[in-house]
Amino acid sequence: MRKLPSSLDEIARLISSCTLCALHAYRKNPVPGEGNPDADLMLIGEAPGRTEDETGRPFVGQAGKILDEALAKAGLSREVVYITNVVKCRPPNNRDPRPEEVRACSPYLEAQVRIISPKVILTLGRHSTGLVFSWAGLPFRSIMAVRGRARRVEVLGLRVTVVPTVHPAACLYNPRLRPLLEEDVKLASRLSRGMGLEGSLELE
């Protein structure tokens, strides 16, 4: 993208015709993201899955149900947050996104973050956490080593709070992770409303 897009609709149009990486050849529908363009809380996942590829919407499969329930327990809904992924097209067989695919898609995500300008970014899983941490110049080793703590950082010229957590899909395979996800979503919700700052925020 040579010219920075000025709206989420423009980003979605660019994604719909994107051929910057090999993933475009496998997609049925790109999944640019959805939600409140003025959201204080932005959620960033990894990549669309099969159901997302069929519908063009993020987190609408089994992992999406877990995420919706976690949002509800935190007093949130999809209407008040913005949800997107690191890559906007489904990797074949739901494999991990490759570095070149993340690089190709990153300008779209960066533009989304700049346009929405959220107070809080909730990163879902290691891929989104690793990418956002790299923007902030923070080291990243594993999601379990960093989840559950909020960090006030500068990313893309914005001062934001980043809350890393496990990916909802991981809760399908390990139900013991679900309370951790729900706890972290509640933390992100409180921080996005300016609540619960004491003792929960690390300044970087």
Image (spheres, rainbow, N blue to C red):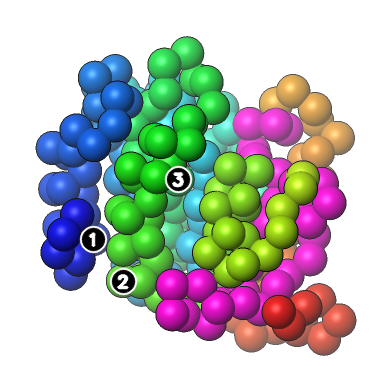
Q: Position of residue 89 (x, y in %)?
A: 34, 32
Q: On the rendered image, what quadrant is the C terminus found in?
A: bottom right
SS at circle 3: loop
Residue 198 position by quadrant = bottom right
Q: Are marks 2 and 1 in contact (CB under 8 Å)?
A: yes
Q: Tell me, yes or no, whether the highlighted magenta stretch contains residue 36.
A: no
> Tag 2: residue type?
Ile
Mark 1 is surrounded, within 10 Å at the Cα level, by few (under 14), some (14 to 19) or many (20 or more) other residues, namely: some
Residue at point 72% right, 53% down? 140
As drawn, the label of residue 86 is 3
SS at circle 2: helix
Which comes before the other along the chain, label 2 or label 3? Answer: 3
Q: Is residue 182 visible?
A: no
Cα–Cα gap, marks 2 and 1: 7 Å
Residue at point 53% right, 64% down? 135
Residue at point 50% right, 20% down? 94
Q: Position of residue 169 (x, y in %)?
A: 63, 31
Q: Which residues are magenta?
A: 143-171
Q: On the rendered image, what quadrant is the N terminus found in?
A: bottom left
User: Is 160 drawn above or below residue 189 in the view shown?
Assistant: below
Residue 130 lies left or right of residue 34; in this view the side is: right
As drawn, the label of residue 8 is 1
